[in-house]
């Protein structure tokens, strides 16, 4: 019998008796699918096995298991064998030429992005998956590297169109010579169903992760929040956090969650006093060799006294203090750029560096003086130079992080969640050996050969420089519980866990990357369940398949994009613009696979950035939370109010945004002609965003993302109601069968009519701009009236403001339609004629009926609940 809660493979075999003719066949050196050659020149040492012959048992819920078994004839596993065992093996899977594909590959250790091509040699190293177009069958095939035993795999380019599979353990002590199921292949007529079916099949097979549909998500996914990172970097302190939250309240938007990012922890460098915080840290690169030396907050948070910010003499955050911070950040950037210049000079072979060294030293002197002025501006909390580790604040509830979180909640009643940042291994440099009760050891870093093709990264350079203070994997559960139980006790409701793929650097002595990851993720999962209700975690710097296959039993929320860069960190002035489009491409295409396992998080941005509106348009329909990293006093509230209700909730879509089918095999970054289109659905309509992301992208030769300024120009494309994949959300499927739709263009403020057989709408989008199209099925009311509710047009996702629609109302006033709408502003509907009356919250109100069927009325914001009821009598 199968173990409890597991289903045996014999059930799969029985399910497949009606599907003896499986789609895939490996014969004569060709892997074919339904008679069409997919890969040719397949080596003799490559094997193919049907799904049921490999998948023996599963702990998956029965409905999911039955769903997978019903589709199992559409997929199978590729394996290969070698004569000599090794800890890393490379083998061809065969080749393809003149067949379009879209893929996702790791361009840094932590981050993945989209790539397209037409043969196996066009793939990039560290490819997480490749989706091939098979127009001969009106279908798509997914090639999906997996995990087998202690090995993980990725695709790589080979010569002459060959697709290579690279399998590695991460330890020279862990070797193998053969694999039965290192790659999964699957076919479907629908690319979105294909991703669902393939990842569901692997979930059933591996039993090491769970799908998004099996898990709960954190409550913050439909709210507005603020992250402190770009506002303060490492200089974050209680005064700044307080005034940051207060700023939003004063501007008419209440943050519902707060993320205190990097800068709150107790960290120091190996040469520092082991019981004192590192001094004068401001930018990300400065703390990457520092290690965690205690689990409690650093001194600047530890010295906070209860009530400090509540009284009449609370310290201010005036314009002078903001100017000090901005100057401090600018000086730190200047130092970082000077150090990068010196590094480039060294690589060029120059040995005379005294000019660089002198300049850097002078800049650091200036920086330290400025930092002293900054600290002096918040001296009310500093308490002199006494170390927090030696004072009573570690145990008193009247000081420290607990006192601060309690004061925050007393003053800001709507602040539901307070998260803090930490690296997977504690701090960027791990845990300082000997500083805690844990067995931590400084481990030298070894990079996988497969990362040779990735982009140069300051974080990697710094981690290599300092190594990682790794807590022994046997103590992983103790490690996370020691951190998280303290945080939960002092009022923290969740954590943003960053730098997740550090583990693959330090796995040599711990059974390899798969086994080390299993131990750490098990400990993290247990702590998440115990301390943060099983949901309070944002995963970041995690975009590699072994995290998704090993770390997501419980984690249900994570980043799908690289960092928001307000400017190019390498100094390209155009990066202010073109890097923003790159961010959107990351998010849209990563959501195709990550969205099967976690709720995609499109990350923060700054509302006063030059491209803030561009970002805001995508966040409005991404299907996740909206949060920003604005500096104190640096807000565009008019823009934010197009995204967020006054109570800090948002008009969130019902799905997660995905690229449309006609975008899948194009390059919306630098082909000079393609628009990125992303679709989503609301409760009562569909939404499509068209974004001009042209101007930058990956350069395989230079192995970096760079600008393509010749592509930074207006581009044209088409939009059609069939671009929306209505059937991907069961509740929306019926809307995809409407005879006619009202179509609203949010930016152009146009209302049109369309239907499934209409010609596509031609649009031209300028660089770094967008248009949002809302499609709503038109309802026939009686013999003559046609009606469709669009929503609040002052919101980017106006359709998301509609909470309920009742077309069968009959309360004696001849009301034909009742609509519940959240928010305040201009409510738009399509109507082919004027109603007799319109009621707003029970009272008759005036309205306008403009040309083209624009039926408009004003809706106020209702403080109690934000909801208004609008009734239409025809």
Image: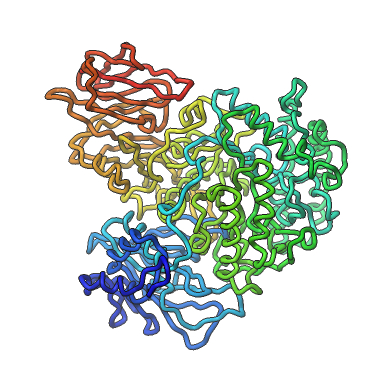
Residue 269's place in the image compared with 727, above or below, is below
Which residue is at the front of the view, 327 or 502?
502
Q: Residue at x 76, y 60 (%)?
A: 437
In percent of width and height, residue 655 lies at: 38, 44
- Residue 286 located left or right of residue 688: right
Which residue is at the front of the view, 635 or 200?
200
**Number of numbered discs:** 0
Name the residue at the bottom extreme.
Answer: 83
Which residue is at the front of the view, 666 or 134?
134
Residue 492's place in the image compared with 58, above or below, is above
- The answer to whether residue 528 is visible is yes
In percent of width and height, residue 48 lies at: 34, 77
- Residue 585 located left or right of residue 411: left
Q: Residue at x 37, y 35 (%)?
A: 772
Q: Residue at x 37, y 84 (%)?
A: 44
Which of the 4 image quarters holds residue 123?
A: bottom left
- Residue 547 located left or right of residue 810: right
In percent of width and height, residue 259 lies at: 61, 41
Residue 642's place in the image compared with 668, above or below, is above
Query: What colour scheme has been applied to the protein in the rendered image?
Result: rainbow
Q: Quadrant of the C terminus?
A: top left
Residue 501's place in the image compared with 513, above or below, is above
Name the residue at the left extreme.
Answer: 783
- The answer to whether residue 562 is visible is no
Q: Quadrant of the N terminus?
A: bottom left
In percent of width and height, residue 153 lies at: 48, 70
């Amino acid at each position: 019998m199968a173990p409890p809660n597991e289903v045996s493979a014999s059930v799969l075999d029985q399910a497949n008796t009606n599907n003896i003719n499986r789609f895939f066949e490996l014969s004569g050196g060709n892997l074919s699918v339904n008679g069409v050659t997919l890969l040719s020149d397949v080596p003799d040492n490559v094997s193919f096995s049907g799904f049921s012959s490999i998948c023996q048992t599963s702990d998956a819920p029965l409905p999911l298991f039955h769903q997978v078994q019903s589709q199992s004839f559409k997929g199978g596993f590729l394996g290969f064998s070698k004569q000599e065992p090794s800890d890393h093996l490379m083998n061809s899977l065969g080749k393809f030429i003149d067949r379009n594909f879209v893929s996702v590959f790791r361009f840094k250790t932590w981050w993945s992005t989209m790539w397209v091509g037409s043969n196996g040699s066009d793939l990039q190293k560290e490819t997480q998956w490749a989706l091939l177009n098979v127009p001969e069958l009106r279908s798509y095939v997914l090639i999906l590297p997996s995990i087998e035993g202690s090995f993980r795999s990725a695709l790589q380019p080979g010569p002459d169109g060959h697709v290579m599979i690279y399998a590695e353990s991460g330890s020279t002590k862990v070797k193998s010579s053969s694999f039965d199921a290192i790659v999964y292949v699957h076919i479907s007529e629908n690319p979105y169903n294909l991703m669902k079916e393939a990842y569901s099949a692997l979930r059933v097979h591996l039993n090491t992760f769970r799908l998004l549909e099996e898990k709960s998500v954190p409550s913050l996914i439909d709210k507005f929040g603020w992250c402190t990172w770009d506002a303060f970097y490492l200089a974050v302190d209680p005064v700044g956090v307080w005034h940051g939250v207060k700023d939003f309240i004063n501007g008419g938007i209440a943050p519902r969650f707060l993320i205190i990012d990097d800068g709150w922890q107790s960290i120091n460098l190996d040469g520092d006093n082991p019981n004192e915080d590192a001094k004068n840290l401001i930018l990300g690169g400065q703390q990457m060799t520092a290690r965690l030396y205690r689990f409690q907050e650093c001194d600047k948070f530890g010295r906070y006294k209860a009530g400090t910010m509540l009284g009449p003499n609370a310290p201010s955050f005036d314009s002078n203090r903001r100017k000090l911070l901005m100057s401090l950040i600018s000086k730190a950037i200047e130092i970082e750029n000077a150090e990068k210049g010196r590094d480039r000079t060294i690589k060029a072979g120059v040995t005379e560096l005294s000019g660089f060294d002198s300049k850097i030293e002078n800049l650091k002197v200036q920086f330290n003086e400025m930092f002293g002025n900054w600290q002096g501006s918040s001296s009310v909390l500093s308490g002199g130079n006494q170390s927090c580790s030696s004072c009573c604040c570690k145990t008193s509830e009247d000081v420290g992080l607990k006192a601060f979180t309690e004061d925050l909640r007393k003053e800001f009643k709507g602040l539901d969640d307070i998260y803090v940042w930490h690296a997977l291994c504690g701090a960027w440099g791990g845990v300082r050996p000997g500083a805690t009760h844990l067995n931590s050891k400084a481990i030298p870093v070894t990079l996988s050969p497969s990362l040779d093709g990735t982009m140069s990264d300051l974080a990697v350079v710094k981690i290599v420089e300092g190594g990682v203070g790794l807590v022994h994997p046997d103590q992983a559960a103790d490690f996370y519980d020691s951190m998280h139980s303290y945080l939960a006790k002092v009022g923290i409701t969740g954590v943003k866990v960053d730098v997740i793929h550090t583990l693959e650097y330090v796995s040599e002595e711990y059974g390899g990357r798969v086994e080390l990851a299993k131990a750490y993720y098990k400990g993290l999962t247990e702590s998440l369940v115990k301390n943060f209700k099983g949901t309070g975690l944002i995963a970041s710097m995690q975009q590699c398949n072994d995290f998704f296959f090993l770390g997501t039993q419980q984690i249900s929320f994570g980043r799908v994009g690289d960092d928001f860069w307000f400017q190019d960190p390498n100094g390209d002035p155009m990066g202010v613009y073109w890097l923003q489009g790159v961010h959107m491409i990351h998010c849209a295409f990563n959501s195709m696979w990550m969205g099967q396992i976690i709720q995609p998080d499109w990350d923060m941005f700054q509302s006063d950035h030059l491209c803030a509106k561009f970002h805001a348009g995508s966040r409005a329909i991404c299907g996740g939370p909206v949060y920003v990293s604005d500096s104190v006093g640096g807000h565009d509230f008019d823009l934010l109010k197009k995204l967020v209700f006054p109570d800090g909730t948002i008009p969130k879509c019902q799905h997660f945004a995905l690229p449309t089918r006609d975008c899948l095999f194009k390059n919306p970054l630098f082909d000079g002609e393609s628009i990125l289109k992303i679709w989503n659905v609301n409760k009562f309509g569909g939404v499509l965003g068209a974004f001009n992301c042209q101007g930058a992208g990956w350069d395989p030769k230079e192995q970096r993302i760079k600008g393509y300024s010749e592509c930074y120009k207006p581009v044209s494309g088409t939009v059609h109601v069939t671009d929306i994949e209505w059937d991907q959300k069961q509740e929306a499927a019926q809307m995809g069968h409407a005879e006619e739709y009202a179509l609203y263009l949010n930016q152009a403020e146009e209302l049109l009519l369309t239907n499934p057989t209409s010609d596509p709408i031609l649009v031209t989008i300028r660089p770094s701009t967008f248009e949002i199209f809302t499609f709503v099925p038109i309802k026939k009311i009686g013999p003559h009236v046609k009606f469709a509710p669009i929503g609040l047009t002052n919101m980017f996702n106006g359709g998301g403001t509609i909470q309920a629609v009742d077309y069968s109302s009959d309360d004696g006033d001849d009301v034909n339609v009742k609509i519940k709408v959240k928010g305040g502003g201009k409510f738009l509907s399509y109507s082919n004629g004027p109603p007799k009356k319109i009621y707003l919250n029970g009272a008759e109100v005036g309205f306008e009926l403009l040309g083209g069927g624009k039926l408009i009325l004003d809706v106020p914001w209702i403080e109690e609940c934000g909801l208004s009821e609008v009734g239409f009598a025809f």
